[in-house]
Image (tube, rainbow, N blue to C red):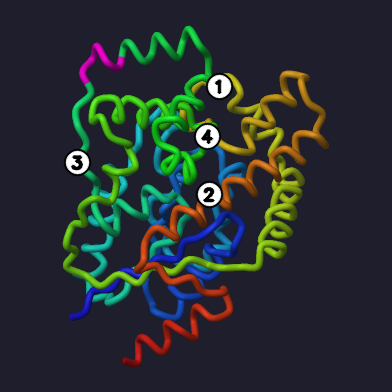
């Protein structure tokens, strides 16, 4: 029996979730979520978790199963997503749909995790001290100086990931990005990876509308409910960070939503930049995805 992984990815607010549900319904299969924030419980508005109604009765895996305090990584996602997919194939489902926009998670599932050097404690400690002494902007500048290619597709507000990129670069004596994707694990299943490709103006309009919808759904109240945990990496995400500034009295809501929309647009552009590195990725308008796949299935 053929085993096929159909990956629906792309920039935030491009319509991935709805398309994945339509595809899974048509193929009588289930969906594995590939979102690094939707794994956490308690923040469904800020992470745009699809509602039960939006899921259309399709089982979704790796959604809202961790506490905010829990550690998670691309390596753990790879292991768990493969376990789910292999169980579904064993049960007789030919296709498994993956849906999400977390670039590292998608790469881990499709190509495997890269072997990276172990960072000695003295290197990590020295870098941590430099960061403490010089501040967050210094860390961003250091990451950009050492590895501009990685920073082109990175979330520059995720300081823990930037720290990791810098420490690996220092130990390896070569850019962190040069160590990523250097090898590809041979998978025993077919992979079709599709990035939803919309005109820039349409994508940005969708992002702006989503921000307003999230605010109307109670984003600020959700942020208040977890504000005391804001030091956790799980809450280091666009949407919550801007709401925390409102809670602290630094910004008014109108300004925060405008900044949230801007930061989301920046992240969406980085997602597209990242996916263009993979020559096997297909960029398709959302309306062309299902017709393309139906043709593939007939072959």
Distance between mark 2 and mark 1 Cα atoms: 19 Å
Q: Residues within 10 Å of mark 4 (few under 14, many from 20)?
A: some
For the residues labelled 3 and 2, say whether their Cβ atoms are less than 8 Å apart: no
Q: Nearer the viewer, residue 101 or 269?
A: 269
Label placed on residue 115:
3
Check disc 1 and report its element: helix, strand or loop. helix
Real-space Cα separation, disc 1 to disc 3, in angstroms: 29 Å
Task: Look at mark 4 in the image and give the residue it sits on.
Answer: 156
Q: Nearer the viewer, residue 112 or 77?
A: 112
Q: Magenta span covers which residues? A: 120-124
C-alpha distance separating marks 1 and 4: 10 Å
The location of residue 106, given as percent across then percent down, is: 37, 55
Q: Examine the image and state in which quarter residue 142 appears.
A: top left
Q: Position of residue 233 (x, y in %)?
A: 46, 28
The quadrant in which residue 7 appears is: bottom left
58 shown above or below 240: below
Q: Nearer the viewer, residue 140 or 77?
A: 140
Q: Is residue 53 magenta?
A: no
Q: CA distance from mark 4 to mark 3?
A: 23 Å
| Mark nearer the N terminus (1 vs 4) | 1
Among the two numbered marks 3 and 2 on one chain, the one whose residue lies closer to the N terminus: 3
Q: Position of residue 212 (x, y in %)?
A: 76, 48
Q: Which mark is residue 137?
A: 1
Quarter of the image with the C terminus is bottom left
- Disc 2 vs disc 1: Cβ atoms closer than 8 Å? no
Q: Which class describes the residues within 10 Å of circle 1: few (<14), some (14-19), or many (20+)?
A: few
Which label is found at residue 64? Answer: none
Q: Which residue is mark 2?
A: 270
**Label 3 crowd bin: few (<14), some (14–19), many (20+), radius 10 Å:** few
């Amino acid at each position: 029996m053929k085993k096929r992984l159909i990956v629906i990815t792309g920039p935030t607010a491009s319509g991935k979730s709805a398309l994945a549900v339509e595809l899974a319904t048509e193929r009588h299969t289930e969906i594995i979520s590939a979102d690094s924030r939707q794994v956490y419980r308690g923040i469904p508005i800020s992470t745009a978790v699809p509602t039960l109604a939006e899921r259309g009765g399709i089982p979704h895996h790796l959604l809202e199963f961790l506490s905010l305090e829990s550690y998670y990584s691309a390596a753990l996602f790879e292991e768990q997503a493969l376990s789910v997919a292999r169980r579904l194939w064993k049960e007789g489902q030919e296709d498994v749909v993956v849906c999400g926009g977390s670039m590292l998670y998608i790469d881990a599932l499709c190509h495997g995790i890269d072997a990276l050097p172990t960072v000695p404690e003295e290197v990590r400690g020295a870098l941590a001290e430099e960061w403490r002494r010089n501040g967050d902007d210094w860390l961003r500048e250091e990451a950009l100086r050492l590895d501009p290619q990685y920073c082109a597709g990175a979330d520059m507000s995720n300081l823990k990931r930037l720290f990791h990129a810098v420490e690996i670069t220092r130990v390896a004596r070569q850019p962190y990005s040069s160590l990523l994707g250097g090898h590809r694990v041979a998978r025993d299943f077919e992979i079709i990876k599709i990035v939803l490709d919309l005109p820039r103006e349409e994508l940005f309009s969708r992002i702006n509308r989503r921000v307003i919808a999230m605010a109307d759904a109670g984003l600020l109240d959700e942020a208040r409910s977890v504000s005391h945990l804001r030091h956790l990496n799980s809450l280091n995400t666009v949407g919550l960070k801007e709401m925390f500034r409102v809670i602290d009295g630094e910004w008014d809501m109108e300004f925060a939503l405008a900044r949230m929309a801007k930061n989301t647009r920046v992240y969406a552009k980085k997602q597209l930049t990242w996916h263009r590195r993979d020559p096997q990725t297909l960029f398709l308008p959302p309306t062309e995805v299902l017709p393309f796949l139906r043709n593939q299935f007939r072959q």
